[in-house]
């Protein structure tokens, strides 16, 4: 049986009416209620000492506290749901920016009780459901997913990396680690698809036609329409056990010389302008990156402690 | 997908929203850049403050913008970077190429 977790809410506000309203909501919901002022230094001090399930930040005076809270939550890869009260400031653009920064809900007013209660109830449902899922995800012993598809079927799409999202969600990995793994996977998949199966050369990105379109994009379009290239398959196998994540990607291209790929070296002083960034990003995100002899299969490995 | 463009003084600005990690995002950046470039802007600032993830797709398009401006003695700048995008730029030493516009 899953042990019931204590749910907690932090309210960052000086407003007595808001404190009273949120306090009553927490009592009714059986949640623990914590408070701070709306100053960013106070909020961050509390967040550094403890985690909360929901944070309500009153931005009626200024939005700095809200922005700092969102930045902190994003950098920590934390799971707090953040409700921001903008108090009538800024309009749609401000709300949009706050959502882009990770706000779960943006409310125009601190005194609109039905809207506040509705937002709190909505976030509570999300939190309680997510908490149950997190317990389940932490229990995953192994998971293997395999995709086999042609380059034409892949097109410009990204394949889902569900197991890694689950690991982030239950906080077995933090957000920066998740981002690096996701980018490493995208790079390896893109290399197999574009340089492997479609045999596109990076140097073609430097050549432009009169409309400002590069040769790489033009030839890519034509090769996706040519079954000689586009029917070539890509096999992706993603395997997780509690000690490691392995991603194997194999294409049906001719392979490449792995002995002289350009990538950043320790003594690198200049940025790579032409090619090699993908390999650097793969090695940055994963603990091991290795190729088969032909160069048409790559294995990415991330170890977990 | 479309990015909002504007101007700040004598600089063109592109506000990139969302992740710069797909062909669509790269294409949207190319179009926004071309729009300012065709208007005669030769100092262009990328605002990547709302970008969570960037990969080779996005970086390749950023570098395309950099090279086209450089060929005409122009400048590509970025608004102050943070988080994963900042780390990626530093890893690939793009922070040495693109000056920061913190005006």
Image (spheres, coloured by chain):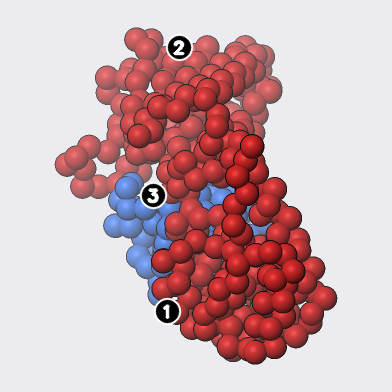
Chain colours: A red, B blue
Q: Nearer the viewer, residue B60 or A84?
A: A84
Q: In which quadrant will I find the C terminus of chain B?
A: bottom left
- Contact (CB < 8 A) between labels 1 and 2? no
B49 to B94, vertically: above or below:
below
Instruction: Identify which residue is drawn at 38% across, 33% down.
Output: A304
Instruction: Identify which residue is drawn at 53% across, 82% down.
Output: A38
To which residue does mark 2 refer? A254
Which numbered mark, 3 or 2, is in the foreground of this view? 3
Instruction: Identify which residue is drawn at 41% across, 20% down.
Output: A299
* Chain of the residue that carries numbered disc 2 in the rendered image: A
- Cα separation, mark 1 vs mark 3, equals 28 Å
Mark 2, secondary structure of its residue: loop
Which numbered mark, 1 or 3, is in the foreground of this view? 1
To which residue does mark 1 refer? A41
To which residue does mark 3 refer? B88
Lateral position of residue A44 relative to residue B91, left or right: right
Q: Which of disc 2 and disc 1 is earlier in sequence? A: 1
Q: Nearer the viewer, residue A247 or B28?
A: A247
* Chain of the residue that carries numbered disc 1 in the rendered image: A
A158 to A254, vertically: above or below:
below
- Point out residue A121 in the picture as x, y percentages from the top left corner: 76, 63
Residue at the right extreme of this rendering? A114
Residue B24, visible in the rendered structure: no
Circle 1 residues within 10 Å: few <14, some 14–19, many ≥20: some
Please tell me in which quadrant of the rendered image residue B86 appears: bottom left
- Point out residue B68 in the picture as x, y percentages from the top left corner: 45, 53
A21 to A278, vertically: above or below:
below
* Chain of the residue that carries numbered disc 3 in the rendered image: B
- Judge if badges 3 and 2 mark residues of a common chain: no
Mark 3, secondary structure of its residue: helix
Mark 1, secondary structure of its residue: helix
- Point out residue B22 in the picture as x, y percentages from the top left corner: 58, 42
């Amino acid at each position: 049986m899953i042990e019931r977790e204590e749910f907690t809410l932090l309210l960052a506000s000086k407003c007595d009416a808001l404190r009273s309203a949120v306090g009553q909501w927490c009592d009714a919901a059986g949640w623990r209620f914590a408070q701070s002022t709306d100053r960013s230094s106070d909020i961050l001090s509390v967040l550094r000492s403890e985690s909360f399930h929901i944070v309500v930040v009153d931005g009626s005076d200024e939005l700095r506290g809200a922005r700092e809270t969102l930045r902190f939550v994003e950098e920590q890869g934390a799971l707090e749901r953040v409700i921001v009260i903008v108090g009538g400031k800024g309009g749609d653009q401000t709300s949009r920016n706050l959502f882009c920064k990770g706000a779960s809900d943006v409310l125009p007013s601190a005194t609109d009780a039905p809207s506040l209660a509705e937002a709190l109830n909505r976030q509570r449902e999300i939190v309680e459901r997510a908490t149950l899922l997190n317990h389940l995800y932490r229990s995953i012993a192994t998971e293997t997913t395999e995709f086999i598809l042609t380059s034409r079927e892949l097109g410009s799409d990204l394949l889902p990396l569900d197991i890694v999202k689950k690991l982030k969600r239950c906080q077995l990995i933090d957000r920066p680690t998740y981002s690096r793994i996701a980018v490493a996977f995208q790079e390896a998949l893109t290399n197999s698809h574009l340089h492997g199966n479609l045999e596109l050369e990076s140097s073609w990105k430097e050549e432009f036609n009169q409309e400002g379109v590069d040769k790489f994009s033009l030839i890519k379009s034509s090769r996706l329409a040519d079954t000689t290239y586009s029917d070539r398959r890509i096999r992706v196998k993603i395997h997780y056990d509690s000690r490691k994540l392995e991603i194997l990607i194999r294409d049906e291209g001719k392979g490449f010389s792995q002995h002289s790929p350009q990538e950043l070296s320790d003594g690198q002083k200049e940025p790579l302008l032409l090619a090699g960034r993908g390999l650097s990003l793969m090695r940055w995100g994963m603990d091991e990156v290795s190729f088969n002899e032909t160069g048409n299969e790559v294995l990415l490995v991330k170890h977990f402690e | 997908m479309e990015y909002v463009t504007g101007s700040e003084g004598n600089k063109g600005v592109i506000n990139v929203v969302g992740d710069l990690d797909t062909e669509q995002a790269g294409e949207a950046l190319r179009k926004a850049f071309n729009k300012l470039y065709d208007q005669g802007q030769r100092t262009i600032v990328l605002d990547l403050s709302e970008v969570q993830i960037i990969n080779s797709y996005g970086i390749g398009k950023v570098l395309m913008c950099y090279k086209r401006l450089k060929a005409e003695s122009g400048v590509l700048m970025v608004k102050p970077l943070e988080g994963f995008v900042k780390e990626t730029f530093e890893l690939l030493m793009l922070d040495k190429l693109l000056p920061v516009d913190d005006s």
